[in-house]
Image (cartoon, rainbow, N blue to C red):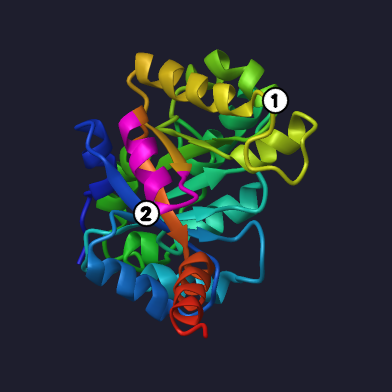
């Protein structure tokens, strides 16, 4: 059944806290469990790891009929990739490797139908296999989310220009890559990066633009909530498995 709603977009517009799961494993049951638990969103990671288009569509399908919004982190700002993940039914894209407003404007252009962009019209899941072609294409430019990853020093320096690009729905901060870009490879928040992260959130909030980040622990998730982040990645699927397994092993240590 066709719906023009994007629950995540609506929640963020109301300044509500949203909780998400980062999906890196191929089993769609992971996303199905997340949707059953009531996660607000999942990010299907197609930048790193091994997920292919078949995996992506299975994860997207697992959110059907739920209030969990499926987003896809694309591998790069490339027209064909963006078109395909949106045709498969993603409600939006997380855009990596951003260095300035030109990158973001290009991603928006690829994600939007004319006259706002150059996205081609396909008879795929996004249009209910053409059964709702008119309605879905009419509403898509408004409800398809484009969320740049702020994960380089260049993007941080160009933050105001990035936020001014029409079609940006939120920002997502990548502390590890931001640290690497600042010369602190292998650190989650290298020297000075914690201050940059908070600066990004505050400057985004001043423009009423939601900002997201991945939490490193449950305590850190509560801290990020209190700092004003509204798209908090509670964990990745692998992170939850490892955390639970480590706790189980520790509980039975002799």
Q: Nearer the viewer, residue 202 or 133?
A: 202
Residue denoted by label 1 = 153
**Secondary structure mostly taken by the magenta-highlighted segment of the chain:** helix
Judged from the image, the secondary structure of the residue bearing numbered disc 2 is strand
Residue most toward the front? 254
Q: Residues within 10 Å of mark 1 (few under 14, many from 20)?
A: many
Q: What residue span does the magenta drawing correspond to?
A: 214-226
Please give left or right for residue 135 compared with residue 165 in the image: left
* Residue 228 in picture, x, y percent from top left: 34, 29
- Where on the picture, by quarter, is residue 197? top right
Q: Are marks 1 and 2 in contact (CB under 8 Å)?
A: no
Residue denoted by label 2 = 20
* Residue 57 in picture, x, y percent from top left: 46, 71
Q: Nearer the viewer, residue 86 or 40?
A: 40
Magenta stretch: includes residue 225: yes
Q: Residue at x 53, y 75 (%)?
A: 55
Magenta stretch: includes residue 19: no
Q: Nearer the viewer, residue 175 or 70?
A: 175
* Residue 223 in picture, x, y percent from top left: 37, 37
Is residue 238 positioned above or below 95 on the image?
Answer: below
């Amino acid at each position: 059944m066709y719906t023009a709603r994007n629950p995540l977009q609506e929640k963020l517009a109301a300044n509500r806290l949203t909780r998400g799961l980062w999906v890196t494993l191929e089993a769609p049951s992971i996303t199905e469990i997340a949707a059953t638990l009531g996660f607000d969103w999942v990010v299907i990671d197609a930048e790193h790891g091994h997920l292919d288009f078949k995996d992506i569509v299975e994860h997207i399908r697992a959110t059907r009929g739920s209030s969990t919004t499926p987003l896809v982190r694309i591998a790069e700002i490339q027209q064909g990739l963006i078109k395909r993940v949106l045709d498969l039914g993603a409600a939006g894209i997380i855009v990596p490797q951003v260095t300035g407003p030109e990158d973001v404007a290009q991603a928006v252009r690829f994600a939007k139908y004319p006259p706002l962009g150059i996205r081609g019209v396909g008879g795929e899941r996004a249009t209910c296999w053409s059964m709702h072609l008119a309605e879905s294409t009419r509403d898509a430019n408004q409800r398809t989310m484009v969320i740049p990853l702020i994960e380089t020093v260049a993007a941080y320096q160009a933050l105001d220009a990035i936020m001014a690009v029409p079609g940006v729905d939120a920002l997502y901060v990548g502390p590890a890559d931001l640290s690497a870009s600042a010369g602190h490879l292998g650190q989650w928040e290298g020297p000075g990066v914690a201050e940059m992260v908070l600066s990004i959130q505050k400057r985004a909030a001043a423009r009423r633009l939601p900002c997201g980040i991945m939490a490193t622990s449950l305590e850190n998730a509560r801290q990020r909530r209190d700092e004003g982040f509204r798209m908090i990645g509670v964990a990745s699927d692998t992170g939850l498995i490892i955390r639970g397994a480590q706790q189980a092993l520790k509980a039975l240590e002799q």
